[in-house]
Image (spheres, rainbow, N blue to C red):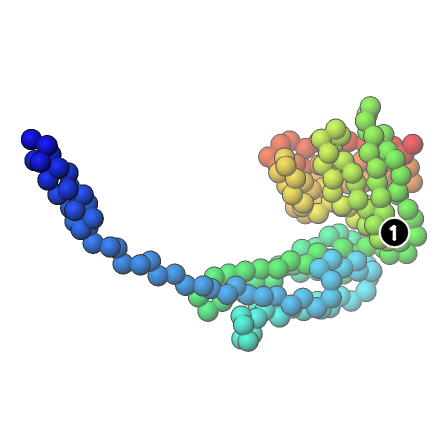
Amino acid sequence: MNIIKNITCFAFILFALTGCDLADPIESEITEYADFNMEGESFIYHQVGTAFTDPGVTAMEGEDELEVQITGTVDPNVTGVYYITYSAVNSDGFAASADRIVAVGDKEVAFNRDLSGVYAVGTSFNTVTRTEPGIYQNSDVLPPNSISVWMVDLGNGDLVIPPQPSRFGSVSADPSVSPGSYGRLDSETSFTLSLKIGGNPLFLRTFTKQ
């Protein structure tokens, strides 16, 4: 009986080892996405009322230059934040893109004031830091949720927060992106934000310098 069991067990193992053919190896290919070389900066502060020329961008796939499609325009006579997307498709049909943000504003006004400081928002506080002329880092636009974003002073009383990621979803205060959202400088020591955060209704907050 033991001999029969051993023979049966050996036959089962032999079948398991030889009963199935090895599958053909899976072939894989590597694709090289478009590599964008952007002229100028990815963020440009442009003086309102003066002609704007897109600095341009090139897209490469290895040594080959790809055709670039441009989406978005800039009206240099109207203050606001404009979004330009450059896209290209490689030889395998895979698309890639790069983005540029152009703020059109009054440099003389925006660059010569400083909104930096500690602000009260209800019973909470946050810090606004000028990182470069006309550009600020806001430590928390919806205290106490620690949503840190950068915002642009357009020099005409408008503050704009371009879309930025957060753990609650995209954050913005830009009517061209999210209708009803906005930023407004009430005085040199106070501003109001109507914020769009993820899929939530608009949040209205006023910030008062301490």
Q: Is residue 59 above or below residue 83?
A: below
Q: Is residue 39 at all visible to an observer of this figure?
A: yes
Residue 35: percent from left, percent from top? 58, 66
Q: Is residue 194 at all visible to an observer of this figure?
A: no
Q: Nearer the viewer, residue 137 or 105?
A: 137
Left or right of 91: which side holds 156? right
Residue 146: percent from left, percent from top? 73, 34
Q: Residue furthest bottom?
A: 63
Q: Nearer the viewer, residue 104 or 8?
A: 8
- Residue at 84% in and 40% down: 128
Left or right of 175: which side holds 10? left
Quick one: SS at disc 1?
A: helix
- Residue at 81% in and 55% down: 105
Q: Is residue 133 above or below residue 56?
A: above
Left or right of 60: which side holds 129? right
Name which quarter of the figure residue 137 lies in.
Answer: top right
- At label 1, the amino acid type is Ala
User: How many dots with numbers?
Assistant: 1
- Residue at 85% in and 47% down: 130
Q: Nearer the viewer, residue 160 or 96?
A: 96
Name which quarter of the figure residue 72 lies in.
Answer: bottom right
Quarter placement of the C terminus: top right
In this figure, which residue is indicated by the disc labeled 1? 110
Residue 149: percent from left, percent from top? 74, 42
Name which quarter of the figure residue 37 lies in.
Answer: bottom right
- Residue at 92% in and 40% down: 188
Q: Residue furthest top?
A: 123
Left or right of 167: which side holds 45? right
Q: Is residue 60 above or below residue 127?
A: below
Quarter placement of the N terminus: top left
Crowding around mark 1 (Cα neighbors within 10 Å: few <14, some 14 to 19, many 20+) is some
